[in-house]
Image: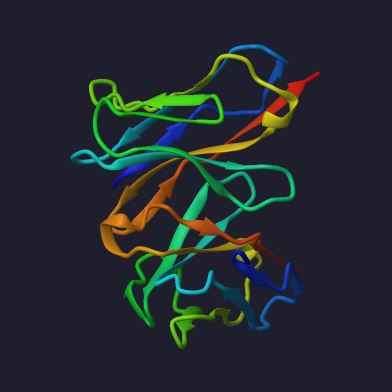
């Protein structure tokens, strides 16, 4: 069945560092891909999405490109802030439901 | 406006008891979803509603789990004869779209269930 694999956390970086969180998926066809984020004490929220191959989703300085050749959707940000500390979930949409990865906890040190 | 709300926020119950978890979606949202997140695991899909009907119940882990939705609004997830492996955070989400457009989902804060 369809699945999403993302890098294990926690990931700890200093402020202004470059961030990459790896995500790969297994699915038939070309499902829509997402990154969701959960800030401390808050509910999950959609961060960005890409609905077809080669699309780039972006929001709040984060980007991810839908790569069908490598079945990947890695999350990147050029300069992270303390306020980016959260848990990030990579996900795909299939048959009216979202399939999530296990989540990657990100800590940003001032 | 008001987001998705869930109650209770925390529930501790003894093994073998029944529990009922409630979700109030965003007003007007047609689709409603239940997910479960066990410690160290990703979110698992449980069930989704389109209006008051549930086209996909494939994620319910056993017949001890059931859910209903009334008035295209509130939904309740019921777990009968709870077991320790049911301990998890149960998340509800709603979407203004249905079918292939329902990927943008708005999540509630979750109910943390602990079975002792």
Q: Is residue A30 left or right of residue B62?
A: left
Q: Determine the residue located farthest toward the left in the rendered image.
A: A29
Answer with left or right where residue A43 lies relative to residue A50: right
Residue at 58% across, 82% down? B80
Q: Is residue B19 above or below residue B25?
A: below
Q: Nearer the viewer, residue B69 or A99?
A: B69
Considering every residue shown, the one lying at the far bottom of the view is B71
Q: Give the tally of numbered discs.
A: 0
Q: Quadrant of residue A78?
A: top right
Residue drawn at (27%, 56%) of the image? B100
Tell which residue pokes out farthest to the top in this image: A17
Q: How is the image coloured?
A: rainbow
> Where is residue B46 shown, x and y percent of the image?
45, 65
- Is A62 drawn above or below residue B111 in the view shown? above
Residue drawn at x 73%, y 44% as measured from the top left: A40
Residue depicted at 23% across the width and 21% down the height: A69
Quarter placement of the C terminus of chain B: bottom right
- Work out whether residue B66 or residue B32 is closer to the camera in this orientation and state it: B32
Instruction: Pick out the residue farthest to the front.
Output: B1
Of residues B10 and A56, the one nearer the viewer is: A56
* Location of residue B69 in the rendering, given as x and y in whole percent from the top left corner: 46, 83
Q: Is residue A69 above or below residue B93?
A: above
Question: In the figure, residue A107 lies in which quadrant?
Answer: top right
**Residue A16's spot in the image, x, y percent?**
68, 13
Task: State the image coordinates of residue B15 (x, y, percent, origin top left).
Answer: 70, 76
Task: Locate the N terminus of chain B and report the quarter of the image it occupies.
Answer: bottom right
């Amino acid at each position: 069945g369809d699945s999403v694999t993302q890098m294990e956390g926690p990931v700890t970086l200093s402020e202004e560092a470059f961030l990459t969180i790896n995500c790969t998926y297994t699915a038939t066809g070309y499902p829509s891909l997402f990154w969701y984020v959960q800030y401390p004490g808050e509910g999950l929220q959609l961060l960005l999405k890409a609905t077809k191959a080669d699309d780039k989703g972006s929001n709040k300085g984060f980007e991810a490109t839908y790569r069908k050749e490598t079945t990947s959707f890695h999350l990147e940000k050029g300069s992270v802030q303390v306020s980016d500390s959260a848990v990030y979930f990579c996900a795909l949409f299939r048959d009216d439901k979202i399939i999530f990865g296990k989540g990657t906890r990100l800590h940003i040190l001032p | 406006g008001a987001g998705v709300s869930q109650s209770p926020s925390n529930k501790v119950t003894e093994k073998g008891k029944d529990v009922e978890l409630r979700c109030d979606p965003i007003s007007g949202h047609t689709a409603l979803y239940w997910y479960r997140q066990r410690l160290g695991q990703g979110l698992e899909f449980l069930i989704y509603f389109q209006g008051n009907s549930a086209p996909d119940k494939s994620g319910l882990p056993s017949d001890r789990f059931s859910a209903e939705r009334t008035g295209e609004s509130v939904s309740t997830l019921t777990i009968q004869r709870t077991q320790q492996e049911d301990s998890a955070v149960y998340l509800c989400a709603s979407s203004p779209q249905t079918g292939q457009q329902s990927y943008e989902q708005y999540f509630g804060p979750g109910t943390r269930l602990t079975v002792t």
